[in-house]
Image (spheres, coloured by chain):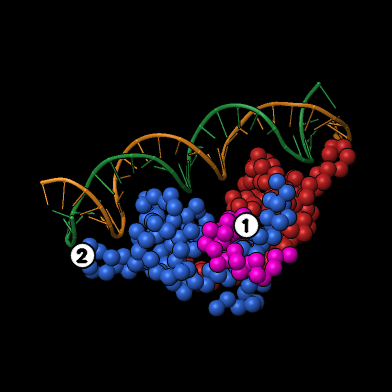
Chain colours: A red, B blue, C green, D orange
DNA sequence: ATTGTTGATATACTAAAGGATAGTGCTATA
DNA sequence: TATAGCACTATCCTTTAGTATATCAACAAT
């Protein structure tokens, strides 16, 4: 766990502050990461299921983003020795814990829309 | 304010969910937005002060990012009729409220580093 | 034999983001 | 008169992100 004192230390230093936020940002930014995470929040999915779930994504991008997310420890890839092969993707504990950051982003985004995007 | 019921509605719909998060993401993503916001958290600053505060940023990027942040209502630009002109940038209430989303990102990013980035 | 399904990869391209460098109009100071 | 500071803008170039399209190998069903 991240202790309070450690958090305060990082927060008070502008350089550390940016680094920690960027680590988070890198995990969720990119055109397709959120749609993938969003789809997996409803449970494990196979490659083709994700492809159908996410309109307009190409297999190239799906494959790439899944690799990225796996290497950040956000999701787990499991291969089953069936014919043809079955591959399942599911969020890890770390992936599910992203709610801690996504929920405030939803709230803030909704508020922003009221404040500035609304008056367009 | 964003009501609880409204939040729950958006959160439960994968499309809306992604839209609200992307609105937030667009405000803070880009190589220089966080350093700028970070610098302004310590108080109002002038153009050249920001330039000195943020190593390696070019005036072109600083100018562009400041415009972006202003148009999302994150900061306010004030021109003083001095000679030569003085321009001050400061966070708006909306900009300061970004703490609500940045704090969880710091915590989550620190945790991530312990989980996966640590073992490199 | 042909077609379809699985989970991808390869190659080539376009678009968006960002960097390098120079220059603007103004004025105070040396 | 030359230099420096202020707040930028313009032009060009490189790097990164994302798209389009075709293909792979294994097999199963028609």
Q: Is residue B15 above or below residue C5?
A: below
For numbered disc 1, what is the local secondary structure? helix
Which corner quadrant of the image does residue D18 belong to?
top right
* B107 in relation to B114, above or below: below
A35 to A111, vertically: above or below: above
| Residue that appears at 53% across and 69% down | B98
Residue D1 position, x and y percent, is 10, 46
User: Residue at position x 42%, y 58% from top?
Assistant: B53
Residue B41 within the magenta-colored segment of the rendering? no
Residue toward you, B6 or A81: A81
Q: In this picture, which residue range is highlighted in magenta?
A: A1-24
The mark lying in front, picked from 2 and 1, is 2
| Quarter of the image where one finds residue B19 | bottom right
| Residue B120 percent across, percent down from the top left | 70, 46
Q: Where is the N terminus of chain B found, in terms of image quarters? A: bottom right
Task: Choose between B69 and C19: the one closer to the eye.
Answer: C19
Asked which quadrant contains residue B23, the reply is bottom right
Circle 2 residue: B83
Give the camera-side residue of A108 and B10.
A108
């Amino acid at each position: 766990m991240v202790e309070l004192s450690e958090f305060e230390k990082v927060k008070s230093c502008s350089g550390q502050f940016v680094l920690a936020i960027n680590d988070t940002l890198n995990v969720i930014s990119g055109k397709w990461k959120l749609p993938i995470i969003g789809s997996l929040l409803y449970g494990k999915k196979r490659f083709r299921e994700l492809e159908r779930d996410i309109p307009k994504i190409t297999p190239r991008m799906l494959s790439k983003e899944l690799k990225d997310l796996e290497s950040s420890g956000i999701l787990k890839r499991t291969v089953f020795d069936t014919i043809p092969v079955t591959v399942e993707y599911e969020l890890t504990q770390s992936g599910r814990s992203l709610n801690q950051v996504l929920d405030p982003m939803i709230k803030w985004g909704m508020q922003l829309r009221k404040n500035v995007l609304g008056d367009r």
